Amino acid sequence: MDLNNTFLGIELGSTRIKAVLIDENHAPIASGSFAWENRLEEGVWVYHLEDAVAGVRACYSDLRKNVEEKFGQTLTRVAGIGISGMMHGYLVFDQDGKQLAPFRTWRNTITASAAAELTELFAFNIPQRWSIAHLYQAILNGETHVKDVARLTTLCGYIHGLLTGKNQMGVGEASGMFPYDDATGDFDGACIAKFDRLTEKYHFPWKLRDILPQVLRAGERAAVLTAEGAALLDETGALQPGIPMCPPEGDAGTGMVATGSVRPGTGSVSAGTSAFSLQVLEQPLKKYYPEIDVVVTPAGKTVAMAHTNTCTSEIDAWINLMADAMETMGQKVDKNALFSTMYRKALEGESDCSGIIAFNYFAGEPLTATETGRPMLLRLPDSRMTVANFMRSQLYGAIATLKLGMDMLKREEQVISRSMVGHGGFFKTAGVGQQILADALGVPITTMETAGEGGPWGMALLAAYMLRRADGQSLEDYLDEMVFSKAKSTVAQPTEAGMAGFASYLKRYIAALDAEKAAAKVE
């Protein structure tokens, strides 16, 4: 194996940091991972940056050992590297690189006032998790650190900066920090001017564009790995500096790439800790909607996103409870086998779950105007409380809010999905999440053989595209012709019984939303 012709993608996901190394044929050949988790501190969901750095280093170490075991070689150089991370959120630093506030993640719903005011000012939807909403909320809150901000970035931009010394961002992730202007390939200048006028009364020593990162599209060379960056990644000192690095991207962008869904008219669903649908638009939306994000692909094509803050976390909690119950009875538990068994059991449940409703809200959900989260289970007195019905309800509940967002796009803008490609932990058990989602959305759902590699594989593909594309070759053509032309996939078709059952479930789910909102008031 000529490791000099390989490409490395690293993604800092919600529960796992993962690295994937691909060969010149874009096939994954080695991987590494590190488990981590967010923390709820003083009512705010955060990750500690020292954990991020330690996790990236541990993840790379795991990859390096995997390479040595498989190929008997020491990894000293690759052709290109790309960094990805959980999209958006708030990371700010002063001119000396000191972190000024805790990393406020995508999961928080603490910027409602700022998001609403900016949405009206820009006539463009600003979701609560976007970086600019967090910055303006900090201003409204009178937080003293704001005057010292010299750099505003996201998680992938932060790690990229440590490795390269550059404040840069891929266009897909950048479009979730602040509105993007395709005509200039940069942040929207008119919106920047409006923001500066809005905040001039505070007399900050900075202007907005000065603290935002440089924006780069897929295929552009961002920077190179510095000696300091190489030492951060590889504690053995074997990794050499000077490796080209592509623009860092968020997990939405890498998800689109990993599913080959970057061409107008295509769509994908990422379902794991959070869930979001991404539909690459053939025509611009007629107006903006508070429920729908407008972002772009890593190549700059406009995307309508329906996003939910929680997907599988509540399922994980219930599986852990089941494991605890089994261990209490003296049984040895294989968690992976338990997950797979319970997922498959869901397909045996009644199509409407016999009236059992599951709210998976760990956090607030803007799509349903729910400010804070309270996981909750409801059922009718005569519901048949079987394992199959319970698990089917949990899987339905994981995607119910996402379905509401996609229905709104279809109703208001006639954005109709002919099919979708799914990836993420929800689809890990073959055929289960795929069928549940097909019945929920009423469209065929495709999963690919590489779905398990997900975002880090997509990031490695972006690194390969940067160095291997033909002159003028678009990202869409590169993926279609060079990566997915022979990809193995499976397709789940919606069933009449499944669609009818989910529709019945969703009707009850909507009717019970007031109960979820009432529960959120309980401290």
Image (cartoon, rainbow, N blue to C red):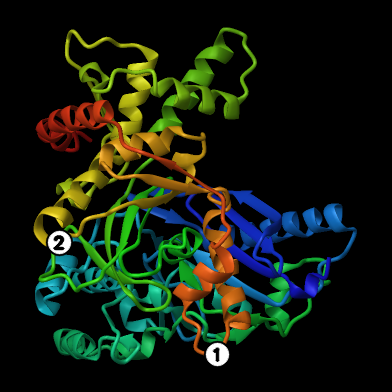
- Quadrant location of the N terminus? bottom right
> 456 or 27, which is in the foreground?
27
| Type of amino acid at the residue the image marks with label 1 | Asp
Q: Position of residue 45 (x, y in %)?
A: 38, 52
Crowd around label 2: few <14 · some 14–19 · many ≥20 (10 Å): some
Name the residue at 18% across, 66% down.
115
> 303 or 468, which is in the foreground?
468
Compared across the picture, whether 457 is left or right of 413 comes to right
- What is the tally of numbered marks visible in this picture? 2
With respect to residue 101, does 407 lie above or below?
A: above
With respect to residue 146, does 68 lie above or below?
A: above
Crowd around label 1: few <14 · some 14–19 · many ≥20 (10 Å): few
With respect to residue 353, does 453 lie above or below?
A: below
Instruction: Give the mark toward the camera: 2 or 1.
Output: 1
Q: Position of residue 25 (x, y in %)?
A: 68, 66
Write down the residue under mark 1.
471
Q: Position of residue 19 (x, y in %)?
A: 64, 59
Name the residue at 14% across, 64% down.
113
Checking the image for residue 233, the label placed there is none
Give SS at disc 2: loop
Compared across the picture, whether 401 is left or right of 473 comes to left
Compared across the picture, whether 384 is left or right of 234 comes to left
